[in-house]
Image (cartoon, rainbow, N blue to C red):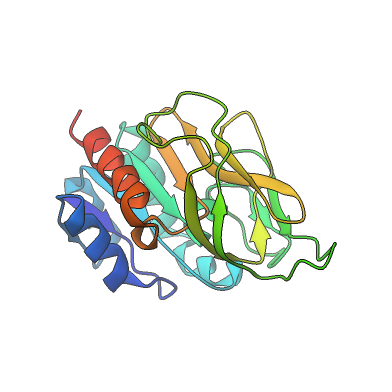
């Protein structure tokens, strides 16, 4: 079973539907100890980075212990940003720190609106387990104002005023800034790829 973390900041219903389409069911742990039975962890989220403060303490410790055992983790939207060290959106709130760097606000330049809402294309510069079967320039659905920097862990990038990390991957830690559950067939393929990683 894959654990879907509910910290009060995610559209859990749409994520569950997306994973159901990908052939997997999720359970929502009620306490950190429940992660011991998880084959994978999903951290969703929309809204302000400050919401991730609810994960500080026991939840973050349990998530770290679980991924240290090799359990795959997928961060979606705000969940991807939480994989980094923090965000300018809520400077006093720490991220998981699994990937170096800090998230920053997208620039409002050239007539582009922020938040970045809608479909945009991916640049996929390297092979990736998470993005297997996802082609260059595939369109996916975004809704966000802050974004992660492009680091060595970037598996895909996108541009909206600036180039940012649209997907990250390092060993068994994955993240997507877009919403795969709202990104048609390509999004379901990405969820299938994560499910496959939990079965290795």
- Give the residue at the far right of this rendering: 110
Location of residue 88 by image quarter: bottom right
Residue 72, above or below 184? above
Q: How many marks?
A: 0
Q: Nearer the viewer, residue 52 or 127?
A: 127
Q: Tell me which residue sits at (33%, 62%) in the image.
A: 5
Q: Residue at x 18, y 34 (%)?
A: 199
Looking at this view, is 6 or 24 the one in front? Answer: 24
x and y, in percent, of residue 7 in the image: 40, 70
Q: Position of residue 67 (x, y in %)?
A: 36, 38
Q: Is residue 172 above or below residue 81?
A: above
Kindly tell me whether residue 130 is visible in this rendering.
yes
The picture places residue 131, in percent across and down from the top left corner, at 40, 36
Residue 43 vertical placement versus 128 (above, below): below
Residue 98 point in image, percent of width and height: 53, 40
Q: Is residue 101 left or right of residue 64?
A: right
Closest to the observer: 110 or 44? Answer: 110
Q: Residue at x 58, y 37 (%)?
A: 123
Q: Is residue 191 left or right of residue 140?
A: left
Residue 28 appears in the rendering? no
Quarter of the picture holding the C terminus: top left
Could you tell me which residue is drawn at 18 percent across and 61 percent down? Answer: 27
Q: Nearer the viewer, residue 85 or 167?
A: 167
Task: Locate residue 149 relative to residue 63 in the image: left or right.
Answer: right
Q: Is residue 82 above or below residue 72?
A: below
């Amino acid at each position: 079973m894959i654990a879907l973390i509910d910290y009060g900041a995610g559209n859990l219903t749409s994520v569950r539907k997306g994973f159901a389409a990908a052939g997997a069911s999720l359970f929502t742990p009620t306490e950190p100890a429940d992660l011991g039975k998880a084959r994978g962890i999903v951290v969703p989220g929309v809204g302000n980075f400050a919401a991730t403060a609810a994960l500080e303490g026991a939840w973050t410790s349990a998530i770290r212990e679980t991924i240290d055992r090799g359990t795959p983790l997928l961060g979606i939207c705000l969940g991807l940003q939480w994989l980094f060290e923090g965000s300018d959106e809520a400077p006093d709130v720490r991220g998981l720190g699994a990937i170096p760097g800090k998230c920053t606000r997208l620039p409002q330049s050239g007539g582009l609106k922020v938040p970045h809402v809608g479909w945009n294309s991916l640049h996929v510069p390297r092979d990736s387990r998470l993005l297997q079967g996802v082609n260059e320039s595939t369109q996916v659905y975004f809704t966000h104002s802050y974004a992660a920097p492009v680091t060595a862990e970037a598996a895909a990038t996108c541009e909206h005023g600036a180039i940012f990390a649209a997907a990250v991957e390092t060993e068994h830690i994955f993240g997507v800034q877009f919403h795969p559950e709202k990104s048609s067939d390509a999004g379901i393929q990405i969820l299938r790829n994560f499910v496959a990683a939990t079965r290795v």
